[in-house]
Image (spheres, rainbow, N blue to C red):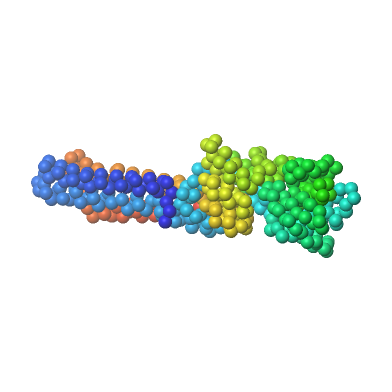
Amino acid sequence: NSKPAIGRLADKISAVFVPSVLMLAVVTFLAWFNLGPAPALSFALVATMTVLVIACPCALGLATPISIIVGVGKAAESGILIRNGEALQQASRLTSVVLDKTGTVTEGHPAVVGISPAEGWTEEAVLRMAASIEAGSEHPLAQAVVSAARARQLDLVSVSSFDALAGSGVRAQVEGKPVLLGNLRLMQRSGVDISALYSHAHTAALRGQTPIYLAVDGQSAGIVVIADPVKPDSRAAIARLQALGLKVVMLTGDNVATAQAVAGQVGIDTVLAEVLPADKAAKVIELQVRGEIVGMVGDGINDAPALAQANVGFAIGTGTDVAIESADVALMRGSLHGVADAIAISTATVRNIRQNLFGAFFYNILGIPIAAGALYPLFGLLLNPMIAGAAMAMSSVTVVSNANRLRRFRPTGM
């Protein structure tokens, strides 16, 4: 039921076109009645009816919705669910695509790959403490820590005064001691000296892994290193987006070194790292203020505001329900190729709509003067109303046939 802007433009033109044709029909009648040969009334009636019949804007009315129906259906065949007509048109106009890292560029199934304990601590003690804090969290990184502790059959302890710190980590009381678990920003803000562990964390970050710091009673206790592998097809999909002339930006709350390492693996040059969940939408706004038409791709709860803010939001179908509801386009596959396919289908659909509109307008511009009798003074030809009716019907057939060409469209990479 929704229409893209190009469809609303056709409606506006039709609102002017129809009254104009009625006026032209009156002028045609008067011209033939006053200036035409005998029997003037018969010629006037035939010419007037022919103008009205041939100018019937059926093709104009079909031009946009028929292409949208076929285009949306084609997208659905590829696992791309387009929620409104505006998104269908906007996707073809994008200049920038912002990609969330976790679960979008990467698999979204992180796992603990290393533990570096501080002096006086063991790997088991660090992991046990970290997992005890994360046991009640649904965050992918938290689940990775808990899974690692369970794999080692560690007994978790009760936690009190749990406090989630958005974009930083968590704070809690464990066995009567204040414990912090989170990123470098949290440690620095809390005055924890992590110099002894920094080299281990930096090395992990350069590999594209995420170091999580643990501090107990104000002292560093160790780091838990988590890796989230890049999706096998992310690099190829991002290359497709760049080949379309789009600027690709990776947005993440991870530290700069980790973000740059992951970006390097997939060929992304522009990285926005250490972005708090609440600031993701603001980053999208910054790009829009610069004149960019932005597509946002994400899968998590904290991506929802950015997905809603973007000109077109793409939600990975393997993500959260909130993200999918906030987006304009839902990708049932977990692959970024779906974004490139959606843009290609959008571009083809909008091009098809323009072809239909051009054909409908060109037909009327050419047909109305002939119907009005423009050829009669030169060749003695006056268009029969039945021929005009057939021509009007054929214009609709042409529009529908052109729209159906989209069924054979194949985005590159499908």
Question: At 82% across and 63% down in the image, what residue appears?
Answer: 155
Between 144 and 277, the residue placed more toward the observer is: 277
Question: At 73% across and 58% down in the image, what residue appears?
Answer: 143
Residue 371 in the image: state x and y as whole percent.
23, 46
From where the camera sits, is residue 30 visible?
A: yes
Between 321 and 105, the residue placed more toward the observer is: 321
Between 100 and 11, the residue placed more toward the observer is: 100
Is the residue 190 above or below the residue 396 in the image? above
From where the camera sits, is residue 231 visible?
A: no
Q: Quadrant of residue 361?
A: top left
Residue 366 in the image: state x and y as whole percent.
29, 43
Q: Residue furthest top?
A: 290
Residue 368 in the image: state x and y as whole percent.
26, 45
Number of labels in the image equals 0
Q: Residue furthest right?
A: 120
With 407 as the anchor, is 24 left or right in this view?
left
With 407 as the anchor, is 315 left or right in this view?
right
Residue 394 in the image: state x and y as whole percent.
33, 53
Between 217 and 385, the residue placed more toward the observer is: 217
Question: At 78% across and 61% down in the image, what residue appears?
Answer: 158
Q: Quadrant of the N terminus?
A: bottom left
Q: Which residue lies furthest to the front in this view?
A: 176
Question: At 75% across and 58% down in the image, what residue appears?
Answer: 160
Is the residue 349 above or below the residue 286 in the image? below
